[in-house]
Amino acid sequence: QVQLVESGGDLVQPGGSLRLTCAASGFAFKEYWMYWVRQVPGRELEYVAYITPSGTRTNYKMSVLGRFTISRDNARNTLYLQMSALKSEDTGVYYCAKGREPYSFISIDEIASPAAADLRGQGTQVTVST
């Protein structure tokens, strides 16, 4: 069955860096748009970034642009999120998510909605604090 397993979350000081990893299995990873979304305390789930199946195009939430980098290794069925210059407001649970169909884009609103819960992994906790 489809599995998305996130790892790499940790406690880090403001200004620090982390790399999140999402191990994918059970589907043709290289054919899917992939996403990162996050649950920040007190706020709704929000979109963070997406990457096309080939990895040639990416997109970011404005508040993380220039600080986060999404990438993928299709040979290893793995998605990454490199985070730098972390801020306290980046604290939250980070989830990777897949598109619903091969080569099919899901809007950034939908991927962060309850309707897309079946497309997301279990999450990894990132805490940015002194």
Image (cartoon, grey):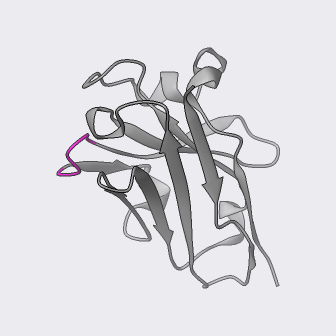
Left or right for 92, reference 31: right
Left or right for 64, reference 126: left
Which quarter of the figure is the C terminus placed in?
bottom right
Residue 126 coordinates in the image, percent (x, y):
72, 64
**31 up-or-down from 72: above or below:** above
Left or right for 57, reference 20: left
Which of the two residues, 101 or 61, is positioned nearer the viewer here?
A: 101
- Residue located 35% across and 18% down the image: 101
Which of the two residues, 63 or 58, is positioned nearer the viewer here?
A: 58
Which quarter of the figure is the N terminus placed in?
top right
Left or right for 2, reference 94: left
Residue 112 coordinates in the image, percent (x, y):
57, 30
- Residue located 62% across and 47% down the image: 5
- Residue located 68% across and 82% down the image: 14
Residue 119 coordinates in the image, percent (x, y):
55, 26
Q: Main secondary structure of the magenta part?
A: loop
**121 up-or-down from 10: above or below:** above
Q: How many tags in the picture? A: 0
Which of the two residues, 41 or 96, is positioned nearer the viewer here?
A: 96
Q: Does the stretch in magenta take in 97?
A: no
**103 up-or-down from 97: above or below:** above
Residue 77 coordinates in the image, percent (x, y):
40, 49
- Residue located 69% across and 47% down the image: 123
**84 up-or-down from 104: above or below:** below
* Numbered range of the magenta stretch: 52-56
